[in-house]
Structure formats: C-alpha cells, structure tokens
Image (cartoon, rainbow, N blue to C red):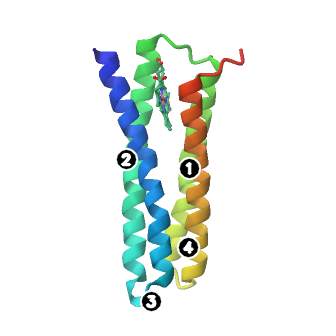
C-alpha cells in the first residue's frame, strides 16, 4: 500500500516535472509575434512553468529514494546509479541553462530573438534529459 502510494506520487511528480515543458513552445511562438510592451508577461509565464517543473523535481527525488528503499533496489545497480548521476546533471543544467536565460530577460542586452532561442534550446535539452530518465525507469537496464 505504502509502496503503491509512493510510486503513484513519484509518477505524478514525473508528469509535473516534464509535462509543463511542452507548454513553453506555444508560449515562445506567441512571444515571437507579441509587441514589445507584452514581452515581460511572457517571461513571467515561462518562469511560472519552470517553477512547476522544479517543484515536480523536488518531489521526484525523495519519492525515488523511498522507492529504492521499499523495492530493495541496490544503489550500485546500473540504472539507479545512472539515474542519480543524470538527475544531478539535470539540477546543474537547470542552473546553467534556464537561470541565465531568465537573468538575460532582465538585463539591458535583452533581445526577444536571442531569448527565444536560448529558452527553446534549453527546453529541448531538458526534455531529452527527462526522456533518458524515463527510459531508465521503465526499462531498468542492468549493465552489471
Ligand atoms: C533521483 C531520481 C530518481 C530515483 C532515485 C528514482 C527511483 C525509482 C525507483 C526505485 C522506482 C521503482 C522501480 C520498481 O520498483 O519497479 C521508480 C519508478 C519509476 N520512476 Fe523513478 N526515480 C527517479 C527519477 C525519475 C524521473 C526523473 C522520472 C521521469 C522522467 C521517473 C519516472 C519513473 C516511473 C514512470 C516509474 C515507474 C516505472 C515502473 O513501475 O516500471 N523517475 N523510480
């Protein structure tokens, strides 16, 4: 029962940590055509999306650790180690890719085209990262 509930929360948080990212593309498309006085509201909307993604990530990690414990998985099994390493990279990535884009939006050098390009690239890369994690979770490859 506790295992099922934790797994449910884990999968729900995985959805929250990934799903909203797909909402960024239509926002960027609309931002491209928006007048200059509306640009900051798009930046705020994208920040909101990223906050939801980060909150999902904060629940993913503790529930994932609980599942390792409840399921009797070993920290030295390939898929668990790979997940933890990639998850740490994704936290670094959040800091290195999205935070500079948001800082850029507040800076004097801000240009719409460059901001859209930065956020689009970071979003594609983050989705790829979450896709790899999802594959590790579902397939649980054991290389050793
Ligand atoms: C620190 C990060 C994570 C850890 C330690 C972790 C750990 C685990 C563990 C131990 C299980 C249970 C496996 C089982 O007993 O069958 C699990 C299931 C699952 N995880 Fe994660 N996870 C993490 C991150 C993620 C991420 C980022 C995603 C999605 C992108 C994700 C999606 C899933 C899914 C969909 C399942 C269900 C798979 C199944 O039942 O076959 N997890 N996770």
* Within-10-Å neighbours for mark 2: few <14, some 14–19, many 20+: few
- The residue identified by callout 3 is 36
Cβ of disc 1 within 8 Å of ligand 1?
A: no
User: x, y percentage for residue 37?
Assistant: 39, 89
Q: Evaluate if marks 2 and 3 touch, with contact meaning CB atoms under 8 Å apart.
A: no
Cβ of disc 4 within 8 Å of ligand 1?
A: no
**What separation in Å lies between label 1 and label 3 (alpha carbons)?**
29 Å
Name the disc covering residue 127, or none: 1
| Secondary element type, mark 2 | helix
User: x, y percentage for residue 57?
Assistant: 43, 42
**What separation in Å lies between label 2 and label 4 (alpha carbons)?**
23 Å
The answer to which of 16 and 77 lies nearer the viewer is: 16
* Within-10-Å neighbours for mark 3: few <14, some 14–19, many 20+: few
Residue at (53, 46) in percent of width and height: 91
- The residue identified by callout 4 is 116
* Within-10-Å neighbours for mark 1: few <14, some 14–19, many 20+: some
| Secondary element type, mark 4 | helix
Residue at (39, 59) in percent of width and height: 49
User: x, y percentage for residue 103?
Assistant: 51, 71
| Secondary element type, mark 3 | helix
Q: Evaluate if marks 1 and 2 touch, with contact meaning CB atoms under 8 Å apart.
A: no
Q: Which residue extends farthest top?
A: 72
Q: Nearer the viewer, mark 2 or mark 3?
A: 3
Residue at (43, 39) in percent of width and height: 14
The answer to which of 6 and 108 lies nearer the viewer is: 6
Q: Evaluate if marks 1 and 4 touch, with contact meaning CB atoms under 8 Å apart.
A: no
Is 63 drawn above or below residue 73 in the view shown? below
Q: Evaluate if marks 4 and 3 touch, with contact meaning CB atoms under 8 Å apart.
A: no
**What separation in Å lies between label 4 and label 3 (alpha carbons)?**
14 Å
Instruction: State the image quarter where residue 10 is shown.
Output: top left
């Amino acid at each position: 029962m506790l295992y099922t509930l934790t797994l449910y929360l884990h999968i729900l948080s995985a959805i929250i940590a990934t799903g909203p990212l797909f909402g960024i593309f239509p926002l960027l498309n609309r931002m491209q055509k928006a007048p200059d006085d509306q640009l900051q509201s798009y930046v705020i909307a994208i920040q909101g999306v990223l906050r939801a993604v980060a909150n999902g990530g904060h629940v993913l990690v503790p529930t994932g650790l609980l599942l390792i414990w409840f399921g009797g998985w070993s920290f030295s099994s390939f898929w668990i180690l790979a997940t933890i390493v990639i998850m740490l990279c994704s936290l670094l990535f959040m800091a290195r890719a999205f935070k500079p884009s948001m800082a850029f939006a507040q800076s004097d050098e801000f240009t719409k085209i460059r901001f859209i390009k930065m956020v689009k690239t970071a979003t594609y890369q983050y989705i790829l990262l979450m896709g790899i994690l999802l594959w590790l979770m579902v397939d649980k490859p054991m290389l050793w």
